[in-house]
C-alpha cells in the first residue's frame, strides 16, 4: 500500500519505525523487489502496511507485514524472506467528508 503523508504520520504514531522517503535511492530497488509500497524500517527489519478488509467505524485498518529481517543484527544488511504478517495492526483515521 502506498500511503499519503497523513497515513504515514498516523502509522508512525502506532508503529515504532522510520518511513523510507520516496526520494531515497534504495526505493527503486525495493519497488523492483516488492512492488509499489510505502516502506518502514524498524528493529526487526523492512516492513510494509497492507490494508485489512474489515468494516471499522473509526476508519480503515492496515496490518504490518515484515518483508526482510536484519542480518546479523547489526542493522546494515537486510535478508528478504516470504512476507510475514505481524500482530501489529495500524488504524487510520476515517476520511472526513465535508
Image (tube, rainbow, N blue to C red):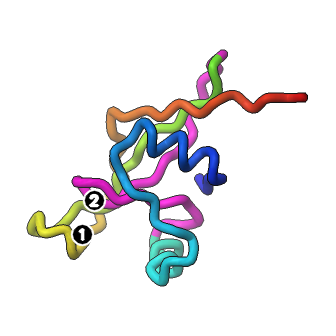
SS at circle 2: strand
Q: Which residues are magenta?
A: 34-57
Q: Residue furthest left?
A: 72
- Is residue 70 rendered to the left or right of residue 5? left
Q: Is residue 56 magenta?
A: yes
Reply yes or no: does residue 52 show up in magenta.
yes
**Mark 1 surroundings: few (<14), some (14-19) or many (≥20) residues within 10 A:** few
Q: Which mark is residue 79?
A: 1
At horizontal 79% and vertical 29% (from top left) the residue drawn is 96
Q: Specify whether 61 is left or right of 63.
A: right
Q: Is residue 82 left or right of residue 53?
A: left
Q: Give the residue drawn at x 54%, y 46%.
A: 9
* Front-lying residue, 73 or 79: 73
The residue drawn where x is 25% and y is 70% is 78
Q: Is residue 81 above or below residue 88?
A: below
Q: Residue furthest bottom?
A: 25
Residue at the top extreme? 57
Measure the C-alpha gap from mark 1 to mark 2.
8 Å
Quick one: quadrant of the C terminus?
Answer: top right
Question: CB of mark 1 within 8 Å of CB of mark 2?
Answer: yes
Secondary structure under the numbered disc 1 in the rendered image: strand
Residue 3 - label: none
Q: Which residue is mark 2?
A: 45
Residue 38's spot in the image, x, y percent?
A: 53, 59
Return the x and y of residue 87 as percentages of the image width and height. Answer: 33, 33
Between residues 39 and 53, which one lies in front from this camera angle?
39
Q: Nearer the viewer, mark 1 or mark 2?
A: 2
At x 37%, y 35%, the residue is 88
Amino acid at each position: 500500500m502506498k500511503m499519503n503523508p497523513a497515513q504515514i504520520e498516523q502509522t508512525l504514531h502506532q508503529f515504532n519505525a522510520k518511513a523510507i522517503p520516496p526520494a531515497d535511492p534504495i526505493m527503486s530497488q525495493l519497488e523492483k523487489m516488492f512492488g509499489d509500497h510505502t516502506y518502514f524500517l524498524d528493529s526487526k527489519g523492512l516492513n510494509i502496511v497492507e490494508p485489512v478488509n474489515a468494516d471499522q467505524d473509526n476508519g480503515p485498518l492496515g496490518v504490518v507485514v515484515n518483508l526482510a529481517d536484519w542480518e546479523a543484527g547489526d542493522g546494515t544488511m537486510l535478508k528478504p524472506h516470504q512476507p510475514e504478517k505481524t500482530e501489529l495492526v495500524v488504524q487510520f483515521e476515517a476520511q472526513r467528508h465535508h
